[in-house]
Image: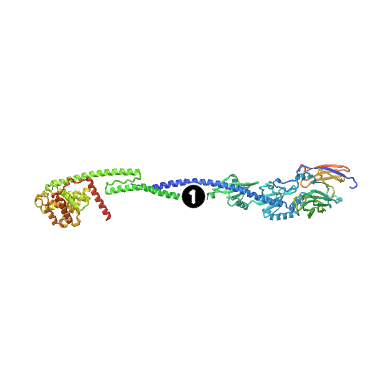
Amino acid sequence: MQTAPAGRITGTVRLASPSSRRLATPGAYPGRRVTPVSERESSELQNVVVFVRLPDGAAPPALPPARAVVRQTDEEFVPHVVAITRGSVVEFPNDDLVFHNVFSLSRASTFDLGRYPKGATRTVTFRRPGIVKVYCHLHSHMSALVRVFDHPHFTVVGGDGTFTLEGLAPGSYDIVAWHERVGEAHAKVTVTAGAASAVAFSLPLKDQ
Amino acid sequence: MTTPAPAPRLVVWLTGVSFAVITGVLGLVFVLLSWQARAGLVDSAARELERSQRWFAEIEGRRVRERQLQAMTIAENPTLKAAVDTYLAETAAGTPPADLLPTIDQEVAKLATVLDARALAVVDLDGRVLSAGGPAGPDWRRGQLLPDLALADATTGAAVVAASRLYLAAVVPLTIGPDAVGAIVSAVPLDEAYAVSLAAGARADIAIVHEGRLVARSPGIPAALDGARLAAGESLDVGGELLVVRQLTVVGATRVYAVSSVTGAAAAATGQLTRVFLGVGALALLLAGLASAWLARVIARPIARLTSSLTHMADTRDLRQPLPRDGVSLELDALAARFDDLRLAVLQAEGESEAAYAGVIGALAAALDARDPYTAGHSQRVASLSVLIAEEMGMPEGDRETLRLGALLHDIGKIGINDAVLRKPTRLTAEEFEHIRMHPVLGARILQPLEFLRPHIPVVELHHERPDGRGYPHGLSGDAIPLAARIAHVADAFDAMTSARAYRPPLPASHALDELRRHTGTDFDAPVVVAMLAVWETRLAPAGGAVPIDPLPFRNPADYTASVRSRAAARDVAQVAS
């Protein structure tokens, strides 16, 4: 793999339906919303993760450790979704005037960073792949999602709905576009050396 | 021949009629008022229910909101939210984290203890139970799908059947940011206890109906009631009990009705009405009885008085007194007037017939006198003299009249004596004398058939009796001889002595008076003789010794009748007194 020049995949993601399912009568109950919905809606595409699903038994590639930052700003985790490689460290700096308490009950990584004030930061090293849901003990509306992969072929879709997967060896790949609540979409993409393969996702699928 | 039953008394009639009328009127008024009161009760029960309904809606709305607020507070619990969201996210990713369920259960159980609700449950967006706690938590099995939760309304909540038990649930979404991940359900069972608590609040009985079936009721609701009948109308008749029904709330297929029984209240009101009417009725009947009695008295008493007067007239045959006029009513006065006319007619007829009798008797007396010239005028003189003596002795006028007539007829028996004996100028033989001595008895026998002359019989029969008992025909003595007979005896003797006879000239009056004096106490009654002497002194001597003769046998037929009647009445009174 190292010898062959890598190819890449570029594509777009479109969210065709509301980003989340709700109870039939959501309007009956005034849910607590801190951030205006309009601002959140515009960035909903940034909560979509596109990744390659490696076949079982495939040799785990070497993982470059990385650092990611999830800020606590205006009682909101920013960004809401991050994708990292196994062994990466995520920083959780507190930008708010109030205390926050970051914790997770997820199997992939269970932690509780305790309360800390503005300006302080705590870090978590994610050692197992999987989905890690992160919350704040003090502000129950706050949540973040850390998707931990044990390979490097993933990315978070940009605000314009485009993405690029770099450094893929030529071959056929199973590509997944995943949104926590909307679900996921699959696509078979063949990568040729030195070239860019295009793919377009629509979430959810029409027959879904 | 059967005797008809006597007619009822007037007072009975009047009381009966008043009783019937009053009872009828009171009964009618009672029925009308009862009906009206019942209608009024239905109205007031309906109004009361509507008031309760509004009040209840407010209270119940507050209770639902409270449960909702509690659920909303719980829905903000970060640990519960994180655990549920994480669990659902990983389940969606295909790896359900079994180790998170105890965490969720523990959180739910902890929160349920601070909650008013009987059951606290966490469900996912499809309405599938994830976890449940609270006393009724076991009804909410994990994995159970409760789609009715999606129908939850903010103000009423949702009606949910869990483990075949009906619950009223407040449903609050579990949100993370803008996204709902599930819901918190706070539920109370819609059971008897709930119905009873609602009944206490709504001040009416409560029936809870789910899908047309009566699932819970407070004790006042008849078990026979079903949802269809409750939904049918505002007022129901269940086994004779009138119920007023109002729908209080609708939650999905569940309806809560407030039911109020009018019959109980109506019975109380009718009972009170009955008591009032019995009181009024008793009073009215008492007054009616008194009024009837008074009226009967006013009408019946004059009639009774009239009857009594007529009875008295019939008994005494005294028709002289006019019948009383009460002036109570025209009719009764007219009746009395007609009776008076009748009375006067009878009186006149009786007077005429008695005058006719008296004429006959006068004629008899005159005929007797005519038989014997020596005795001509004797009867009339004896009669007049007897009356003078009686007047001297103070005899009442009625008795004097009886005496006068008796004296006039005293020798009537001599009609039956032979002329030969009667006119014999010589001394009579013993046999002839015996024959003569029969004339008082004969006279009595002649008068006997004539009822109105019977009072005079003693004078006729006993005018020859002597105080010493040696007189005839019976030999009575002393006071056994009536005074009238004793007077007639003296007058007869005096006139006989002073009159001429076939065998002697008349004796001078002084001689006759001496004879009277001499035989006083033996032949003649002493007080009578004294009176005779006084009469001679005061009346006869100044008039030359002549006895004044009244030519008529009766001065006045009516006077005669009156004297007879009053004496008969006096006799009756004496008999009654003895």
Q: Is residue B196 left or right of residue B464?
A: right
How is the protein colored in the picture? rainbow
Task: Give the percent coordinates (x, y) of residue A185.
Answer: 79, 44
Number of disc labels: 1
Task: Give the percent coordinates (x, y) of residue B361.
Answer: 18, 46
Instruction: Mark yes or no: residue B388 visible.
Output: yes
Task: Give the percent coordinates (x, y) of residue B67.
Answer: 67, 51
Residue at 64% x, 49% y: name it.
B60
Q: Residues within 10 Å of mark 1 (few under 14, many from 20)?
A: some
Q: Nearer the viewer, residue B473 or B363?
A: B363
Q: Is residue B512 left or right of residue B81?
A: left
Residue at 67% x, 54% y: name it.
B116
**Image quadrant assignment for residue B511:** bottom left
Instruction: Mark yes or no: residue B2 visible.
Output: no
Task: Give the percent coordinates (x, y) of residue A103.
Answer: 78, 53
Q: Nearer the viewer, residue A16 or B53?
A: B53
If the image is split into quadrants, where does the C terminus of chain A sit? Answer: top right
Question: Please, what is the three-letter code of the amino acid marked with disc 1?
Answer: Thr
Name the residue furthest right.
A3
Chain of the residue on which disc 1 is drawn: B
Residue at 50% x, 47% y: name it.
B34
Q: Which residue is mark 1?
A: B274
Q: Is residue A141 left or right of residue A61?
A: left
Question: What kind of element bears circle 1?
Answer: helix
